[in-house]
Amino acid sequence: MMRVTMRQLQVFEAVARLRSYSRAADEIHVAQPTVSKQIRLLHEEIGLPLIELIGKKVFLTQAGEELYATCSAWLDSWGRFEQTIADLKGLKQGRLSIAAVTTTKYFMPRMLGPFCSQYPGIDISLEVVNRDRLLERMAQNQDDLYVMGIPPEDISTQSEPFLENPLVVLAPQFHPLVAKRNIQFAEIAHEQFILREHGSGTRLAVEKVFEERGFPLRVKMELGSNEAIKQAVAGGLGLSVLSKSTLNLDATQRDIAILDVDGFPIKRYWYLVRPRDKQLSVVAKTFMEFLKQHIDLLNPYGSR
Amino acid sequence: MMRVTMRQLQVFEAVARLRSYSRAADEIHVAQPTVSKQIRLLHEEIGLPLIELIGKKVFLTQAGEELYATCSAWLDSWGRFEQTIADLKGLKQGRLSIAAVTTTKYFMPRMLGPFCSQYPGIDISLEVVNRDRLLERMAQNQDDLYVMGIPPEDISTQSEPFLENPLVVLAPQFHPLVAKRNIQFAEIAHEQFILREHGSGTRLAVEKVFEERGFPLRVKMELGSNEAIKQAVAGGLGLSVLSKSTLNLDATQRDIAILDVDGFPIKRYWYLVRPRDKQLSVVAKTFMEFLKQHIDLLNPYGSR
DNA sequence: GAAAACCATACCCTTCTGGCTATGATTTTG
DNA sequence: CAAAATCATAGCCAGAAGGGTATGGTTTTC
């Protein structure tokens, strides 16, 4: 590439447009000889005259016309680029890509809603995937933020809790313990449980509690879906422990109930996770701020 | 405009394309830290990160994608521009605009033909206009070259003769002098003449000769067209003096003849004229060279 | 014809660019 | 786990780039 500088093109464009060196100099706020010099340099660099002075009138040669067209187009597209950048900075535009584990689908949409309406120019994509898929996406840096219940140990990530995620004991509506308060842990320990598969965050937490209390965990059934588990519980197949998020909050669940067991709800949190050295986009930063400010309003459990 | 340099964009483009700093450094033939620095400068200038390094992998942020698109397009259009310039220099492309006085229409086309075929990429425009119109065009710098019989006195032009332009005396085919050789000037001086209007170059030259010889010029008829004059001469209305160019060379003119008068043909030339400080385009220069080299072949009078 | 406008040239100066080497931290690879 | 690859940082330097003033020659304008 020739050693042409942007400044030279900018000066040339002004001269070509205004058909005058001195007016161009005025417009750019430099002295007239500076303009002369830039044009001369440009002309030497390109190897063809670009401008003709007949009398004192400025004419463009054919090469000059070509260059004028080229750099007008360039200035134009650079202008659009600058505008885009300004928009990105000003949040008038942008994309926010979030990947979240399946269970979050019960509340994430409601948290995104207000953010959407506050920044209508921002496109949001929420990928709801299982934990493994999410870790894959994170490894490939496919999203801005990740939401999960148990942040990876991996030191190459950083995470912070942003929302409570209590685990509650679920029983069928007509289970004998439903009406009882302050149920002892031992009272449910011998029950059959329906739980998510090994490796699931919830399962992990339940196993830990049983171990701490010194009871064996009797898993009658492993199901891959929270909805299926709720159906199973409702059908009287056993008890379960699930994130409270999975319960429909508005339409009170009619066929299953939460047991008031000692040690429950297990206090857990939802975490915002991101690669350690990933510098967040302005949009992502803003979203995190937004969450912190609105969490009280949004926190369905209100107990912050 | 931000203080972004082309070099920075070039480096960025390479990094974005190759997804690697060190490979980009190789491609551009600089050390790797140089690339790091350029990217850092760009990033500081724009105010948003453009590149993300997750592990050692290069990812583009949204702003980075925008910039990549922008400067890819730019490099592309600059490449086309450079190609155009190269073509112009190499005469693979270009425009040659010539304005010439009316009489040249008898020979200019034949001179342009061979040039056209040698440089097929060059578009040629030949404007055939009267002298006044031609001077106007010259004042407005509308063409590359101008052809006329009498270059303007104006010092702001330069001109050079390139082709003979003999003025000959024409008589009707059956005029008594047609057969005679070495006719004395006095023998035709009393004849009636049919000439172009005042201000025409030919008219000027004729008047001058008559004055030098001390004879009054008797103009019977003024006509604005060479063709009309030839018709008038053929019709026996009088003699005339015209550029030999106006006679059809191939189909020998049957109804008018050239008289072999003392002092004729008046030696005149066709001139290539251009504004003094106009720098000729490569195409125009080449055309002038071409004319000089081919003039012997082209010169219909062969008497160079 | 005088004044004003316009561009070119010469010369000088400051700042910024682009580039290098050396070195260190981290990641990836073998 | 050691070696290789990859990028960041720091510090240094030469030269390019950008800009200014002074001045002079033309052209245009009044």
Image (spheres, coloured by chain):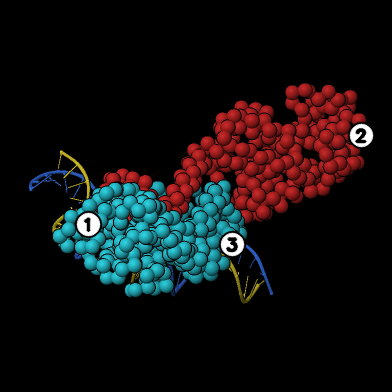
Chain colours: A red, B cyan, C blue, D yellow
Which residue in the structure is indicated by mark 1? Answer: B190
> In the picture shown, does residue A290 fall above or below B141?
above
| Residue B18, numbered circle | 3
Which image quarter is the C terminus of chain A in?
Answer: top right
The amino acid type of the residue labelled 1 equals His
Callout 3 touching callout 2 (CB < 8 Å):
no
- To the question of a shared chain for discs 3 and 1, the answer is yes
Q: Position of residue B128 (x, y in %)?
A: 39, 53
Q: Which residue is drawn at 63% across and 38% down?
A: A124
- To the question of a shared chain for discs 3 and 2, the answer is no
| Residue A154, numbered circle | none
Left or right of A214, for residue B187: left
Left or right of B104, for residue B212: left
Which residue in the structure is indicated by mark 2? Answer: A237
The amino acid type of the residue labelled 2 equals Leu
Between B135 and B302, the residue placed more toward the observer is B302
Q: How far apart are marks 1 and 2 (CA)?
A: 137 Å
Q: Position of residue B160 (x, y in %)?
A: 29, 65
Q: Quadrant of residue A207?
A: top right
Between A112 and A295, the residue placed more toward the observer is A112
Chain ID of residue with mark 3:
B
